[in-house]
Amino acid sequence: MSRNERTIMAFDPAGNEYFIDMFVSVRDLSDLQHTGAISDGPSSFRTREGHSVTHLGGGEFAVMVPGEEEPITVRTEDPDFV
């Protein structure tokens, strides 16, 4: 199961806007000692349109758009990623 953690706004070199949703995997640990406890797993990213996104580091992301041979590099000014 995954949970939407936040949304990041990023731009490509042409100034086009991309909304990237950051999802966190959540595991139910209720079978263990702490009933109902959850644990956050690794983050994953997708655009609002459902395109696959890879975090390249810092404020850069690679967006895989259908029909494009190469991923589109986008950049955010979000302080949590810069």
Image (cartoon, grey):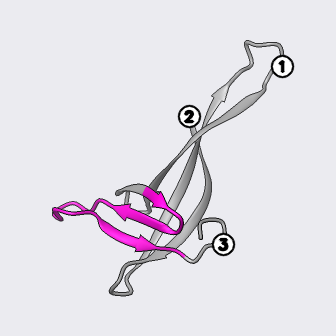
Q: Which numbered disc covers residue 26?
A: none
State yes or no: residue 49 in magenta: no
- Residue under label 2: 1
Name the quarter where the C terminus is drawn.
bottom right
Q: Is residue 42 positioned above or below 29 on the image?
A: below
Q: Residues within 10 Å of mark 3 (few under 14, many from 20)?
A: few
State yes or no: residue 68 in magenta: yes
SS of the residue at dot 1?
loop
Q: Residue at x 73, y 12 (%)?
A: 31
Q: Is residue 47 positioned above or below 31 on the image?
A: below
Where residue 9 sits in the image (x, y, percent)? 52, 73
The residues tagged by marks 3 and 2 sit, at their Cα atoms, a distance apart of: 27 Å
Please provide the residue range marked out in magenta.
55-76
Q: Specify whether 37 is left or right of 14.
A: right
Where residue 67 sits in the image (x, y, percent)? 16, 63
Q: What amino acid is found at the position of numbered circle 3 in the picture?
A: Pro
Q: Residue at x 43, y 64 (%)?
A: 61
Q: Which numbered disc covers residue 34?
A: 1
The residues tagged by marks 1 and 3 sit, at their Cα atoms, a distance apart of: 34 Å
Q: Residues within 10 Å of mark 1 (few under 14, many from 20)?
A: few
- Tell me whether circle 1 and circle 3 mark residues in contact (CB < 8 Å): no
Q: What amino acid is found at the position of numbered circle 1 in the picture?
A: His
Q: Nearer the viewer, mark 1 or mark 3?
A: 3
First in sequence: mark 2 or mark 1? 2
The residues tagged by marks 2 and 1 sit, at their Cα atoms, a distance apart of: 19 Å
- Residue under label 3: 79
